[in-house]
Image (tube, rainbow, N blue to C red):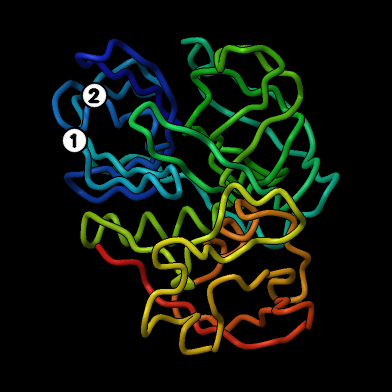
């Protein structure tokens, strides 16, 4: 586990990360996109190891949709953090959050998994939003913990700490026992793409949803292009104005939840969609495609 310090025109910031892969000359570190994004165009990223050594870091790739990034340092043969299986963890399982909350490096806090598959949307200073199918934990997570690992009882990473819920108007409020982590299974998929190509895709249905709709379900927008011509939803027979109420057997409460459900899948997955059209419930199968870029 490492501490990350970012210096940019927008100011200074701190975060955490995990050594995901290390070869003879380079070490790759997983963290959050929002930890390092201010240094993407200009700025400086430094990584501090547990022994106090500090190394300049470069951005290998980043993905705002999942709030994940991979950075590298020119220091090889470092211990890689063991990864677990976030799909197999259960509610009530003990977990420990590692990181540098409020700049206090080498901090650990303990708790349990409070919920799984929690739809969490986080904003970005650059107007980008991340949609996370999160693990929820009551382990104390504070600013500076972002990007650090959430580990299970065996010490294997099951999540990447990413967000906290707050009661006040400021996003810098302290922990109230509502922390959220990106499941490691998703983080590994994205990290492998970032290391290989510098960018990562995510699955899409080829629809635009109406975020102003206040009822239950996700409404395909009737303004602009609600259904992408030739896209997955179009091929499955979905139309503008359809109300999606179930995704693979799970009830859809709102548009954000649908986006998170889609992004928790993989490109090429076939999903069952239940929707309402003219008050008639219908069902279809959609094969998810890759986002552009």
At x 40%, y 57%, the residue is 190
What secondary structure is marked by label 1? strand
* Mark 2 Cα-neighbour bin, 10 Å: few <14, some 14–19, many ≥20: many
| Drawn side of residue 239 relative to residue 194, left or right | right
Q: Which image quadrant is residue 237 in?
A: bottom right
Q: Which image quadrant is residue 88 in?
A: bottom right
Q: Residue under circle 2? A: 45
Q: Position of residue 7 (x, y in %)?
A: 24, 15
As drawn, the label of residue 58 is 1
At x 43%, y 38%, the residue is 18
| Drawn side of residue 271 relative to residue 201, left or right | right
| Drawn side of residue 171 relative to residue 243, left or right | left
Of residues 178 and 109, the one drawn nearer to the viewer in this rendering = 178
| Drawn side of residue 114 relative to residue 256, left or right | right
Q: In the orientation shown, which residue stands out farthest toward the right?
A: 92
Vertical relation: 248 (above or below) 179: below
> Label 1, label 2: how many angstroms apart (C-alpha)?
7 Å
N-terminal of the pair, mark 1 or mark 2, is: 2
Q: Position of residue 184 (x, y in %)?
A: 55, 52
Vertical relation: 133 (above or below) 270: above
* Mark 1 Cα-neighbour bin, 10 Å: few <14, some 14–19, many ≥20: some
């Amino acid at each position: 586990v490492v501490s990350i310090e970012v210096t940019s025109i927008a100011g200074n910031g701190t975060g955490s990360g995990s050594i995901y892969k290390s070869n003879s000359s380079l070490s790759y570190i997983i963290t959050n996109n929002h930890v390092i994004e201010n240094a993407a165009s200009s700025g400086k990223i430094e990584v501090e190891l547990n022994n106090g050594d500090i190394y300049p870091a470069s951005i290998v790739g980043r993905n705002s949709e999942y709030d994940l990034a991979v950075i590298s340092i020119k220091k090889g043969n470092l211990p890689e953090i063991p990864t677990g299986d976030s799909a197999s963890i259960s509610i009530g399982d003990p977990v420990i959050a590692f990181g540098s909350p409020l700049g206090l490096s080498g901090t650990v806090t303990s708790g349990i998994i409070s919920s799984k598959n929690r739809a969490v949307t986080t904003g970005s200073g650059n107007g980008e939003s991340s949609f996370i199918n999160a693990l929820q934990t009551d382990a104390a997570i504070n600013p500076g913990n972002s990007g650090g690992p959430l580990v299970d009882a065996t010490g294997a990473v099951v999540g990447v700490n990413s967000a906290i819920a707050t009661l006040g108007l400021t996003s810098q409020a302290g922990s109230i026992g509502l922390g959220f982590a990106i499941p490691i299974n998703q983080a590994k998929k994205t990290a492998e793409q970032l290391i290989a190509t510098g960018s990562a895709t995510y699955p899409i249905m080829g629809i635009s949803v109406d975020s102003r709709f206040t009822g239950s379900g996700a409404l395909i927008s009737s303004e602009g292009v609600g259904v992408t011509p030739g896209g997955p939803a179009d091929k499955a027979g979905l139309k503008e104005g359809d109300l999606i109420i179930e995704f693979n057997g799970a009830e859809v409460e709102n548009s954000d939840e649908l986006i998170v459900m889609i992004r928790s899948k993989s490109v090429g997955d076939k999903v069952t969609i239940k929707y309402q059209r003219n008050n008639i419930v219908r069902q279809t199968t959609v094969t998810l495609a890759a986002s552009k870029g």
